[in-house]
Amino acid sequence: RYLIWTDRDQSGFPSEGTPNTLADAAPAAQYARKQTYLAVKRLAALRAAADLLGQLGRHELAEHCDRAVDRDAVRVHRQAWLDDHYAVCVDKSALGLTDATTGEPLPYDELPGWDAYSIYTGNGLLLPMMIGQPPLLDPDQLIKDLINATRETMGPYGCGHTSAELDNVHISQNLWRDLLARYLGHSGSALTQRYWDLQVMSNTGGASHGYIDTYINNDHAFFPRGVVCIGSLLSYPRLTIDKLAPGGDRI
């Protein structure tokens, strides 16, 4: 019910509760209303909710969730697609938005980077695809977005959150994007050496930071996010395990 409620103007995008924990991200990726990646995650969550509710016999609410997904997936694509990629957000106004750290209003009228390329677009689709669910947006458009965003966000140790912030690299999110690429049928990026170079740099000489997800000054050392690399064992054969397939379990 919250996922349905958070789309306050029936645009297909959540517009309440959208500030997130990407504390090193540009304002558009951290604070904006109507963020595209959150809209896609909302769609995936509503589809999952529909499946779960259906298993519990709550068919009316399950059908409500399914209808919202079918309707809003079209709306998300129509509003966010910018010729060769999906925008970071579709509401570029900074009016009423505050910095979560300082509590101060953001010093912009228009959020910089709202139309940037982002590696987060399909973030919410990987886990559903691992259990046999189809992508909720057109896979050809998702692959195009993924390829173009990878090119435009490239830095020495992988890709930044968006093309507006090339230095804000999270290795785990790069790996997540690579796994999604494999499940979409794309070969994925060949950036493993860049990811490894960051690990080597962070564990050379006097430095000993174990797995590090981003630059040392972000305090993401000895961090558990590196466990996402296990997904490589699933994504290369594109293994899917569907416990709800018609006729029984399907692998």
Image (tube, helix red, strand yellow):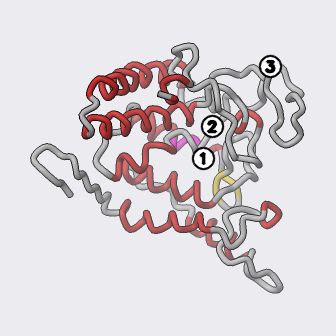
Q: Residue at x 73, y 80 (%)?
A: 203
**Residue kind at label 2, given as amino acid type:** Tyr
Foreground: 224 or 74?
224
Q: Which residue is mark 2?
A: 117
Who comes first in sequence, dot 3 or dot 2?
3
Depth-wise, is mark 3 or mark 1 nearer the camera? 3
- What is the x, y in percent for residue 221? 72, 70
Residue 27 coordinates in the image, percent (x, y)? 77, 35
What residue sits right under mark 1 in the picture? 151
Crowdedness of circle 2 by 10 Å Cα count: few (<14), some, many (20+)?
many
Q: Residue 119: name its quadrant.
A: top right
Give the distance between the C-alpha atoms of the residues marked 3 and 1, in whole angstroms: 31 Å
Asked if residue 148 is among those painted magenta in the image, a careful observer would answer: yes
**Dot 3: element:** loop
Magenta segment boundaries in residue numbering = 146-151
- Can residue 85 be seen here? The reply is no
- Residue under the image location 67 percent in, 26 percent down: 33
In the rendered image, which residue does mark 3 sit on?
95
The residues bearing labels 1 and 2 have C-alpha atoms spaced at a distance of 9 Å
When the figure is inspected, residue 71 is found, relative to residue 27, above or below; the finding is: above
Residue located at (17% from left, 54% from top): 249
Q: Which residue in the rendered view is the most extreme toward the bottom?
A: 205
Question: Mark 1 is on which residue type?
Answer: Arg
**206 in relation to 153, above or below:** below
Extreme residue in the front direction:
57
Residue beneath the point at 43% across and 65% down: 232
Disc 1 or 2, which lies upstream in sequence? 2
Q: Which label number is shown at residue 24?
A: none
Label 1 with label 2: CB-CB less than 8 Å: yes
Secondary structure of residue under mark 2? loop
Q: Position of residue 243 (x, y in %)?
A: 23, 52
Q: Main secondary structure of the magenta part?
A: helix
